[in-house]
Image (cartoon, rainbow, N blue to C red):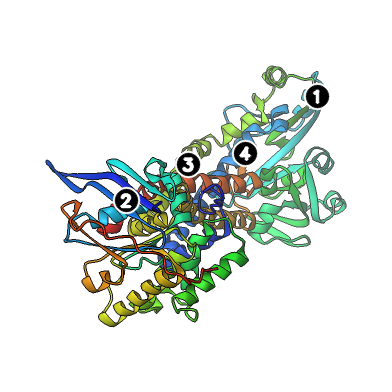
Amino acid sequence: MGTHHHPFAGKVGKPLVKYILKTLWRHRARTFLTVSGTAVAMFVFCLVGSVQQGMSRLTEDTAANQNLIVFQENRFCPASSHLPEDYAAKIQKLDGVREVIPIQVWTNNCRASLDIVVFNGADPTKIQRHRPLVLTDGSWQTFSNRQDAAIVGRGVASRRNISAGDQFTIGSLSVYVAGIFISEIPAEENLIYTDLRFLQYTSGLNMAGLVTQHEVVLNESASPDLVASEIDALLRSGAVATKTRRKSAFQASTLSDLIDLISFAHWLGYASIGLVLSLVATTTVMSVQDRMKEYAVLQTLGVRPSGTVSLVVGESLFLCLVGGCVGTFIASITLFVGSFAIGAEGATIAFRPSLSLALFGVGISLAVGVIAGIAPAIRAATVNIANTLQDA
Amino acid sequence: MALVELSNVTKQFTKGEQTITPLDQIDLQIAEGEFVSLMGPSGSGKSTLLNLVSGIDRPDSGSIVIDGTDITQLSRGKLADWRAENLGYIFQTHNLIPVLTAYENVELPTLLLKQTSQQRARRVQLAMNAVGLGDRVNHYPRQLSGGQEQRVGIARAIVTHPKIVVADEPTGSLDLKTSRQIQKLLQDLNQQLGITMLMVTHDNEVASIATRQLLLNQGKFIDGHTSPSVRREGGEALG
């Protein structure tokens, strides 16, 4: 007995894989339905995960924690915040302030929307200096030289089918697309940048001398909360009172309703995993139930109980893994091609595929596959061989 | 020394409040190369005895020593290893794995032993030839007749060159003509290849192919043992 080599007892050998595949193929309708169900559930899980990741990126971004947004006090929608542009010069004099960027914001929809279009008007040189943007098409020079020029984020460009050189019109705004950009911050890719003057003087806005907000870039040593208090104190005596917050807090506050909804959506992710678990466990239990005699025969021939466990767990693992990989792959492709984003009041949350999300999806599939197979595997491995052979 | 030696083996079942004793302090020796048939009415304990010798059931008391190993002392895992190496089992209803071809069914027990793929292929081919199914290797069980399925089952039982082959009513599900072909095959395997066999049957004609017939009733042998037959000379070894 010491010379035994058991491909069915522990090692995932070629014969074991062949047996599992042949068994699954024999019951291909059941296999197809289980894999499909698993794929759909994992697709939903990955979509929910990508929304969660988008929210985390927005609220945990390090750079956004070091920048401040000065907004009109008690105002929420960009359309209702009107700050004097010359506040920038006053803010600039405070200790710890490196640069102030006056920004005019225009959005086609202040409410929650899946196809929000947000224009940010600012000095082109400051945009190039402070935003992590890389042009994939077009040029910075055209953007700087032409007053009606805009650079468009990849997400908007993809959703609206915009290319460099196009004329893009929405509402009363019409811009020449000087370039398409990508960014390491996915939310940026859902913005359109124009020159501040262009947005201020656009027909219908009449915002000469006014901006929606000031973005304050601080020195690394500055305390954001302290400078924010100083800004609000400084401007309290001005024409318009302000409310200054870290950029991440500002975005979280702007999107607070959406964030509540998205936080709730993580239950949908857990429900998807529960669905996969119950689906694969049901299939595996049914499969084992139908083949108890086969497991008794295999053990009579010399397959160890541990080998029987490997066979059953291998089967559920395969179902979960194939379904999980298919669902995760389709979700990743959908997220990449769709460039989805949800926004409200000028701020957006981008849904992006990510390697970590894909690996997490596959890892969850593996874990669920093992868990779903354990109970039926133990049942098959501990079958009373003599009784089962006699009863069948 | 006997290849198989059962000493004082008792097996009991509880059914409701009733205790049934299908085997009551049984002693049995089977010599190497012997072909023993086991007959008896339903419930006489013959299937229980076969299950105990096969190591798929355990006695309540007594010992079962096969080729020097007391299999009642082995754990479930070790017992599986022992079966893989020492036992061939022929089922009444063939019990082939439906998703595997005839070749793969016969190959299955050899996958549990340490052998090269060439050694396995040679053994499978020899076993298939021995049962006269060398040309049916790629057929699935559903594509075979009942007799052919049983031949594959027999090839699967002998492919590892086990110490003993047990057969549980091997002709029980076959028509008369096919039954006689299988009887002849079993007889040939014993006489020409020297395979030790223990066979349970209801049929006197089938029992008569054995070199010793035993009769069980109410958990005891009623005819006593006949003398162990001597292994026939000239048997060609498999593989």
- Mark 4: secondary structure: helix
Residue A282 shown left or right of residue A230 in the figure:
left
Same chain? Circles 2 and 1: no
For marks 3 and 1, the one nearer the N-term is 1
Along the line of sight, the residue nearer the viewer: A114 or A120: A114
Q: Are marks 3 and 2 in contact (CB under 8 Å)?
A: no
Along the line of sight, the residue nearer the viewer: A45 or A161: A45
In this view, the mark in front (3 or 4) = 3
Percent x, y of residue A166: 75, 62
**Amino acid marked by disc 3:** Ala
Q: Which residue is mark 3?
A: A265
Q: Tell which subunit mark 2 falls on.
A: B
Question: Which residue is painted at 41% across and 42% down in the image?
Answer: B74
Same chain? Circles 3 and 2: no
| Distance between mark 1 and mark 4 Cα atoms | 27 Å
In this view, the mark in front (1 or 4) = 1
Q: Tell which subunit mark 3 falls on.
A: A
User: Taking the image as drawn, is residue B172 in sight?
Assistant: no
